[in-house]
Image (cartoon, rainbow, N blue to C red):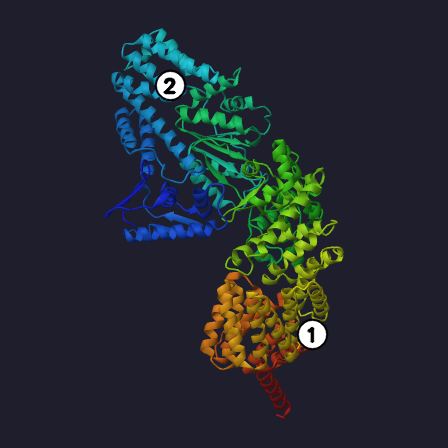
Amino acid sequence: MSANIDIRLLGPLEIAASRGPVVLHGSVQRTLVARLGVRPGETVSREALVDALWDELPPRTATKTLHSHLARLRHQLQDASLAGLIAAQGPGYALLAPAEAADVVRFEAMVDRGREALAGGATETAVELLRQALGLWRGDPLVECRPGEWVRAEAAHLAEIRLAATENLISARLRVGEHLQLVGELEPLVIRYPFRERVWELLMLALYRSGRQADALAAFQRARTALVDELGIEPGRELHRLEAAILAADPTLELNAPRRTTTGTPVCRRLPVPLTSLIDREADKAALGDLAAGRRLVTLIGPGGCGKTRLAIAVAAEHSEAVCFVDLTPLAKPELVPQAVAEAFGLRAQAAGRGAVDSLVDHLHDRSLLLVLDNCEHLVDACAHLVSALLPACPGLRVLATSRETLRVPGEAVYTLQPLATPDPKAVPAYDELLHYDSVRLFVERTRDAGGQIGTDGATAQGLATICAQLDGLPLALELAAALTAALPVPRIAEQLTGRFPALCSGSRTARPQHRAMRTAIRWSYDLLDDDERALFRRLAVFVGGFDLPGVEALWPRADAVELLGRLVDKSLVVREWGNARYRLLDTIHRFAAEQLADDEKCADVRQRHAEFYLALTEQAQEHLDGADAVEWLDRLTAEHENFRAAMAWAVAQPNSTALRLSVALTRYCQLRGHYRDGRRWLAAALDRGAHTPLILRGNALYGSAVLTFLQCDYDAAVPLAKQAMAMYESLNDLEGTARTRTLLGSIWREQADYPRAMEFHRRALDTFREAGDARGIAEALQRCAFSAWLQGDFDPAQQWAQESLQRMRHLGDAEGAAGALLHLGAIAHYRGDQAQALRLLSEARQTSERTGCPEGIAWALNLLGLVHRATGSASATALLQQSLAVHRKLGDRWRMASVLEALAALACDERRWEHAAQLLDEAATLRAAINSPVPPCERPSHERTRAALATAEQIAALPH
């Protein structure tokens, strides 16, 4: 990237290049450039970019929309000969330009150099550097960006640096004798910043050196009035000292007098020395170290037990400047915070908090050091006030705070520490591969520390994966669990994790109280909440697997729901899932919250609200699952699947129709996303308790149950369910319901090879749908007619029906319905020998089903594509069919499994793997016998050739050699 580029953020946002300024459109593009441009070359995560654009309420499609915005911005930059200026990098994006290309970076660097020059006595150099730095400002920064937390924090950070630089420049100019000019410049500053004591000090000194002693003393009185009247506090020690010096005409105030130096106890590192090693936090350590080196206030946040203190110590140990570590855990009162920090520096204890702050300012104002404030969460306001007082007055001070919530101080940079990576206990690799996971390595090392033993067998590997996943990768929880290995084997510990809180309490006797047990660590955070925060936190336990803002508002129908949720996120009790506007509780925290909810008198009301919310959501979704926005709705429902389980478990025990309504509303979703077993189980449980519900609702439940039962090829159970549903529909004169059920019964007869009966039912359903004017029913019935026809080898009418169905489905905006029609047209083309046409149609069907997330459609497309690739001699045929078989097995579709196994047997014969081919055919025959489904006519020629090839091979093998 060209070095001529200039990214100007200190005023109206501009990108200047060799061909002139780049035209940026709207606040979105300016926000993206600003967020990436404040630190050129550094990766900004997608989550951070989403936050910058939408703050706390991103749309559900935030990540997709972000990519669209970035694509348009990058296109504009390319038109301006700046291709590649913004590029994907790691987990996010970066603006690939030299750091000094950004005026913000140049400004901060010159301010630092100017401050250092001033501290070192190079006054004229300091004046030049600070003037150049302040000259980069062309107006207020970031005002054209989208408003939000990042913009506010960054603007406040820059404004603070600008003001501190202005003060340092004035101080330097006073040293070179510009006091007469500075009086006029300082008067507007004290009006604008009446509570900033250093500005008053500079004004008083400028007035005194201008021969205006009385005016200098009057300025002190003005400062005191502002502070006492507005804030209720007396001026600080430095202002009082300056007043006394002016009254006494102290010669040290004169222009060329030696500067006063501060003496005090030297700063020592005072860092605790951990007794165990830091496991696998190198990336976090590097990122946090870079942040602490570049920003003056960094807060490391995360849930209790995630390792914040250990990481802060590791970063501080490698800091280039002096370090002071202050553990705030023992403090109970906010007013003790300044005193505790002062004592850490060896300063004499003060009578009141204000005096301690003054002592700290006097001691630190000309020092460069890192102050680590550990465990701020229970004293967060006091810590925020202390940091706000120290940072402006002490230019060389940097603060690294650890907390379960942010300090919310202007200029604060926040680093969120995530739990360690964990394996999936449902797909456990071998022991050696498990050691690639940070959480497993930590557990293993702590087990050895505890004198425990870990095997490398499969049961131990499963136990390790379960422990790490169940404990959310939280280092504290893993260390407590590892301590149990001295008495229990790993698999037994994994089994006991349902009672994790009683078990995980064997921490070190010397550990902090909140770190001696996992329950205590979470209770510590819980006890810091106010009453409303606790109440909402308990209610969130009703959610399983995550939740969104509308769900929270359903449980907490008050105007402050968003604010309370935000506060729980800030306090690290709720995790926000970046990019999809969802939230969740870590599993350990969820268990604690569930215990609190169980003891809450409103528990039943909360569970009822939860079930009612998901009932309303699913009933609303029903109208969209076969339309143009089906994918969006299906994705939303998929995200809530575990909540559906919880809602159904509650609803089936209630004496109302909620369970039946919810299970019916979920039927189409379960069909399209392949959740056949769940859907059947929910409907069966609801039907068992819904004998007195409205007839139409019960009919819909029976129909839905019949559909899902049919899809698992349990025909003997599906037929009576369908017939019961049809009887109810007929009694209600419900034409659409009757026709739908006829279509279903026709599909059952089709899979059992009763094609005449299947066609009779499909045609009657088609006539009824036409009579009722049901557009989607017509399209569906046409597709079923086509299906039964081409399976028999009757391709001409099949093509006509499938083509009409395709047109109708596309007109309706039903993507998955259109994919089904394409599958039938592709199958017809394949069996007619037009493999090129079949490949085109089936590839489009596969892409559509993958986009809609329909496993049945995906499996069908893979099956037929495998046949096409075999017909063309492609080596991809086997892989496609094996993928299809895997999906059909997962769905439980034994009818298609049999056909795919027979196709794989044909391929095995092609490769002369006779024994394997025979095994595949035997498995297929077993499936067909179990469901009473013979080979379809269109598949018989290939099946008979496979059988014949096997028979010939057996005969040849039997000949004497």
Which residue is pictured at 59% across the width and 57% down the height?
Answer: 622
Image height of 732 relative to 147, above or below:
below
Residue 575 visible in this rendered orientation of the protein: yes
Q: Vertically, is 365 above or below 618?
A: above
**Disc 2 element:** loop
Viewer-nearest residue: 503 or 178 = 178
Q: Residue furthest bottom?
A: 960
Q: Amino acid at mark 2?
A: Thr
Q: Can you identify the residue that label 2 sits on?
A: 261
How far across and how far down the image is residue 890, in percent? 62, 65
Q: Position of residue 262 (x, y in %)?
A: 40, 19
Q: Would you identify the image quadrant in which residue 146 lies?
A: top left
Q: Nearer the viewer, residue 623 or 707?
A: 623
Q: Nearer the viewer, mark 1 or mark 2?
A: 1
The quadrant of the picture occupied by the C terminus is bottom right
* Of callouts 1 and 2, the N-terminal one: 2
Give the alpha-carbon distance from disc 1 to disc 2, as whole Å: 94 Å
* Residue 873 in picture, x, y percent from top left: 48, 80
Residue named by callout 1:
931
Q: Amino acid at mark 1?
A: Ile
Is residue 717 positioned above or below 298 on the image?
Answer: below
Q: Are marks 1 and 2 in contact (CB under 8 Å)?
A: no
**Residue 1, position as x, y percentages in the image:** 30, 50
Residue found at the very far top of the displayed protein: 248
Give 309 or 196, whichever is nearer the viewer.
Answer: 196
| Label 1 element class | helix
